[in-house]
Amino acid sequence: MKVSKTLLLVVIAVFLAAFFMFDLQHYLTLEALKSKQAVIESYRITHPRLAIFIYSLIYITVTGLSLPGATVLTLAGGAVFGLFWGSVIVSFASTIGATLSFLAARFLFRDAVKSRFGSRLQEIDEGVNREGAFYLFTLRLIPLFPFFLINLAMGLTALKTRTFYWVSQVGMLAGTVVYVNAGTQLAKLESLSGIVSPGLLGSFVLLGLFPLVAQKMVLALKNKKIYEPWLKPKRFDNNIIVIGAGSGGLVTAYIAAAVKAKVTLIEKHKMGGDCLNNGCVPSKALIRSARWLAQLKRSQEFGIKQAQAEFEFADIMTRVQSIIKTVEPHDSVERYTQLGVDIILGEARIISPWEVQVTTDAGVQTLTTRSIVIAAGASPLLPPIPGMDKINPLTSDTIWNLKALPKRLLVLGGGPIGCELAQCFARFGSEVTVVEQAAQLLGREDPEVSEAVMSRFKQEGIDLRLEHTAKEFVLKNGEQFLITDHHGASVNIPFDQVLIALGRVANIKDYGIDALNITLSPLNTIATNAFQETNFPNIYACGDVAGPYQFTHTAAHQAWYAAINALFGQFKKFRTDYSVIPWATFTDPEVARVGLNERDANLQGIAYDVSIYNLDDLDRAIADGEAHGFVKVLTQPGRDKILGVTLVGEQAGDLIAEFVLAMKHGIGLNKILGTIHIYPTLAEANKYVAGVWKRKQSSQTLLNGLKCFHTWRRG
């Protein structure tokens, strides 16, 4: 491939050098064309087919190599072949040449651009796949945009070649006819500027705006068809109705109230959603208690001969509930009512694009609204494993009701939820077995990240059953077993209680989206576009119910776009920015990540350099007895631009924030290296990994030269 690219570059370079060296552009001027018009016309009459072939070949070469002179050649087409045949010949020759230029740019440069700007190019490609033909057509209608730049730029995208060809053929036709027609009057032309009058340019601009106007008209007709079955109210009770009071719903309501919109928030269960009641808050409270016990067992490492603790599991769970109660006012009805949000505790059902029916203890009422934001969240996935109905499984929703510690806990699933809770219960004294179908825990992470967590789990006595596929739950002689398949062999795993931690599924039932035929994605979430819109332009979705990420912070992030677009989308819409999404798994050691890891980069074919700093070399980590883990940074080859960071170790979820900020605002490792970090802190690791990168960039030749210089200076 490299040889082919080099050869093509050499050929193009030779053509370009010859073109300018032998002053061939002299023949592609208006003066030269007018002086040779009679000779060219005579040759066309004598050899009509050959004249067409030679002319087409020259035109294709000039446009294919992006050489100056296409305008003059178009005029020549009109002067020599007339309006009809000149337009036909130029149309095909220009499109073929443009396509060759498009293909050359793709072949020579797309891989390099992709490796350097992978994530940004992916966003552009997604936009091109959606509306690339439309935008190319618009650009082709306006000759103010240099066509050769359009050819080269489109070659770097994922636009299909056949789409590029036919859109170019049609889009350039109007301009081609205008210029060919001008060529039929060649004798009267004194300069190229005489062709393009302000009036003509204005006409082209209006022509280019036509597709935009047409698109708006098509969109209006499409919306009319979507809303046709329903009668739109003349007045509305609300600007926004929000369904679900989890992270996404609360942020949506908060923003709407902050800009003085009339907003009603409907919640059928508990304010705060999963994060407050079943997820982030209780799990972190549980992790804190379990971590304290684990550190107590390490007392001798800190010079303390003996330390003991007595506890009751029920007391720990009581503390968890008290933490929820302490945080609860942040998400309470009282707080949001004070902010200006109308709260209704009841069951919502969307009955039209502008109407939501709410059932409460007091009865049923129907509210009207200009926009609806669905933030209905997700629920634990319960797979259809035979025998599930016999075992009363725990989930991340129900495990908080436990009062007694299970003697033998089976955790089905080695993702973040399963890993966090497995380690907690092991530290409290349960015999924990983790069953995972894949070959590693935390399957989205790089192998060494997973290995760091699995190594700690094994040290703490957790039984890891990797590459085990759950087949059936059975009850034998009063004892419960999970039957798994392990490389073709049947394995029986006994347990007292089982936690199903196989992920979460969007809540898409029982509130009317099926009756409205709101479109679902292949992942069975509510399908949304780049603006969080569903297939109904005034109905939005955010958070776990929409995906693609199931994090509290991404739900809040999406909610901003849903709220702003719902309230002000008729003036300006904002595309949800997924360019920098961080997350953390709160095991011990913690795992935090933002951007690409090596696994993702390799899958996407993105080139990268990797820099790793091991925390066993960090003074503060050594002093804290936490000298384990690492910081791994992926950068663009030869540059300090950060593509992704993975942190494994103490407080990884906090330390990642510096890299999130850096990636969001385009700060490279050089600036992180030049930033003072307090000594001794764990945050110094971020600076030191930048130093690792910097040392790799140092030229050995330059260093050897400096050594000689300093030797000379010493005499």
Image (tube, grey):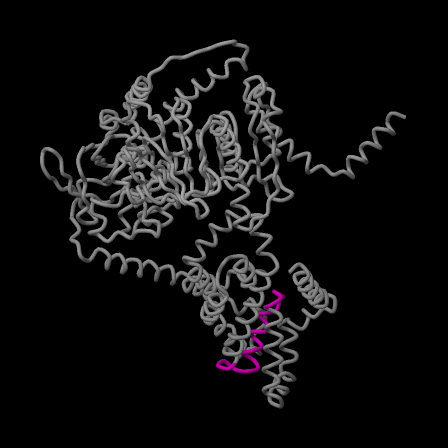
Evaluate whether residue 533 shows in this view.
yes
- Left/right placement of residue 372 relative to residue 38 reads left
Q: Residue furthest top?
A: 305
Q: Residue furthest right?
A: 715
- Screen quadrant of the N terminus: bottom right
- Screen quadrant of the C terminus: top right
Q: Main secondary structure of the magenta part?
A: helix
Q: Residue at x 39, y 46 (%)?
A: 575
- Left/right placement of residue 330 relative to residue 619 reads left
Could you tell me residue 700's position as x and y percent?
76, 38
Evaluate whether residue 542 shows in this view.
no
Task: Give the quadrant of residue 279.
Answer: top left
Decide whether residue 304 is among the magenta residues.
no
Residue closest to the eye, 200 or 210: 210
Which residues, given as a range, are shown in magenta? 64-85
Residue closest to the eye, 568 or 200: 568
- Left/right placement of residue 443 relative to residue 69 reads left
- Left/right placement of residue 144 relative to residue 361 reads right
Could you tell me residue 304's position as x and y percent?
52, 9
Could you tell me residue 82's position as x and y percent?
52, 82
Residue closest to the eye, 303 or 698: 303
Classify 390 as above or below 166. above
Q: Residue at x 53, y 36 (%)?
A: 645
